[in-house]
Image (cartoon, rainbow, N blue to C red):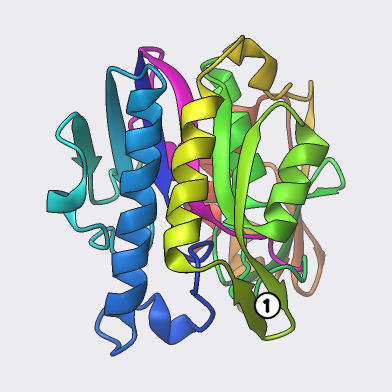
Amino acid sequence: MKVYLSADIEGTAGVTMWDQVERGKPDFQEAREQMTAEVAAACEGLLDGGATEVWVQDAHATTINIIASRLPERTRLIRGWSGHPFFMLQALDETFGAIALVGYHSRAGGGGNPLEHTMSTNLAEVRINDRPASEFLVHAYAAELLRVPVVFLSGDEALCREVASVNPAIGTAAVLSGIGNSTVSLHPAAAVRAIKEGARKALSGDLGRCRVALPERFVVDLSFRKQQIAYKSSFYPGSTLTGPTTVRFIAEGYYDVLRMFLFALYL
């Protein structure tokens, strides 16, 4: 079975400040090392659990974060942004049997991580059918377009609670919790062990139980931090400016939502 692994960094053990996640900043190297260790552990767990190969998407910012030589040999590494509307799952197709998300973080406006955001730091909140949405939910819905289940996620405690509320069959490993502008993290080695074991267990049993049902219709409300970005985004077809910093988009299909995100979220 091929497994797709999408990796972010803000849900990595010990990561707390923006300087840790920005390439070129002095504190980035330590966060990069731990991100790599957690991704490698997840790959090892998935391979031990029955995966034949793991495709890893380095899905944070520049996409040059993971130290490739430290991954198991039965992996492929995806870098760069292709421009596909699947974003952090950009190379996903029907040949994959499962998805793992590593280093993911709480949603914008959720209060679970000092670095929380959804898709863009330009957004204060994203709601899909009035449900506050994280990057997990955005991509779990994308995966369901291809009927590929998300079977495992690691990240902060608040996000793991959200995952359980969406589908408790999805395995999780919480490696940190956010308190205001601070975090409390597992020891780096303990985080690596928890992720490896969680990923291994995630491939057992009926993976179909981990699928996330798609709504029949989508009403998406975007709250931007700046009015000029909301104004620009309101011109995307199907979008309406509902307030100085808020935009509503209505669609019958989720692929249309992803396409709107691709073109409307960024200046």
Disc 1 is placed on an element classified as: loop
Give the total number of marks visible in the rendering. Answer: 1
- The picture places residue 14, in percent across and down from the top left corner, at 49, 74
Residue 163 placement: quadrant: top right
- Which residues are drawn in magenta? 86-109
- The picture places residue 190, in percent across and down from the top left corner, at 49, 58
Question: Which of 72/87 is in front?
Answer: 72
Looking at numbered disc 1 in the image, what kind of residue is underneath it? Answer: Arg
Q: Residue furthest right?
A: 130
**Residue drawn at x 65%, y 84% as measured from the top left:** 182
- The picture places residue 43, in percent across and down from the top left corner, at 34, 37
Question: Which of 120/152 is in front?
Answer: 152
**Residue drawn at x 68%, y 78% as measured from the top left:** 227
- For disc 1, the marked residue is 225
| Left or right placement of residue 227 versus residue 242 in this view | left
| Left or right placement of residue 12 versus residue 212 in this view | left
Question: Which of 197/154 is in front?
Answer: 197
